[in-house]
Image (cartoon, rainbow, N blue to C red):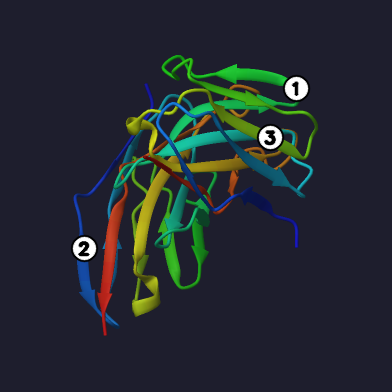
Amino acid sequence: DAMVIQNPRYQVTQFGKPVTLSCSQTLNHNVMYWYQQKSSQAPKLLFHYYDKDFNNEADTPDNFQSRRPNTSFCFLDIRSPGLGDAAMYLCATSRIDRDTDTQYFGPGTRLTVL
Amino acid sequence: GDSVTQMEGPVTLSEEAFLTINCTYTATGYPSLFWYVQYPGEGLQLLLKATKADDKGSNKGFEATYRKETTSFHLEKGSVQVSDSAVYFCALYTSPGANSKLTFGKGITLSVRP
């Protein structure tokens, strides 16, 4: 089945130690999104890629970076995780040129910062 | 700017009870409207959507009708099950294109007792 896959599902890192979260998709969608979701809150968009074009939200901290080496993969890099970065990180995809308004989410990666 | 308002939660119901979760929105243009569901420890799943006024989205016994006159998209189910226990997010999407994004409500937790 076509899907959005996130690895790992659970990630533990230490304060200040860089961490990378991975997202892959078999939907051949041209847009990929990264959201941060803290406990009992709605997802908050960090940034997205439209093809190779990177679009950063104005309030996304510089500590968060992203890479999209090809259509299928997108990575979220947290350069120096703080305790406040502990959250669920959700990847989503959509296809702009048809069914333009539906985003499909992965299962998420829960990040713990010690 | 665009916004989504959901009723305050949590909501606790007995199995087979009728469910209504209220959602109202403010948006420029003509948004598409969505309900997403998030089961414990999981990512978001699209439950249903409607793309224009008077459209009714439906899935798994849940329904919601796009009411432009009242700017609402209330979620209903005639008979809830224990397996419906989850967090429900109402969301909207305007201006499909490279820089478009979902606007979420705060979410509401539904607990269904046997």
Circles 3, 2 touching at the beta carbon (< 8 Å): no
Residue tagged 3: A74
Disc 1 on helix, strand or loop?
loop
Q: Which residue occupies 42% across, 58% down?
A: B64
Q: Which residue occupies 43% across, 36% down?
A: A14
Q: Disc 2 marks which amino acid?
A: Val
Instruction: From the image, state whether disc 1 or disc 3 is nearer to you.
Output: 3
Disc 3 on helix, strand or loop?
strand
Q: State how far apart marks 3 and 2 are (Cα).
A: 36 Å
Residue B87 placement (x, y as % from top left)? 35, 57
Q: Chain for mark 1?
A: A
Residue A98 placement (x, y as % from top left)? 73, 40
Q: Disc 1 marks which amino acid?
A: Lys
Q: Chain for mark 3?
A: A
Using the image, determine if residue A24 lies above or below residue B112.
above
A57 lies left or right of B17: right
Which label is found at residue A52? 1
Residue tagged 2: B11
Using the image, determine if residue A53 lies above or below residue B17.
above
Instruction: From the image, state whether disc 2 or disc 1 is nearer to you.
Output: 1
Q: Kindly indicate the quadrant of the structure image that contains residue A15.
A: top left
B3 or A66: nearer the viewer:
A66
Q: Which residue occupies 65% across, 19% down?
A: A54
Q: Are marks 3 and 2 on the same chain?
A: no
Residue B65 placement (x, y as % from top left)? 42, 55
Q: Residues within 10 Å of mark 3 (few under 14, many from 20)?
A: many
B90 or A79: nearer the viewer:
A79
Q: State how far apart marks 2 and 1 are (Cα).
A: 42 Å
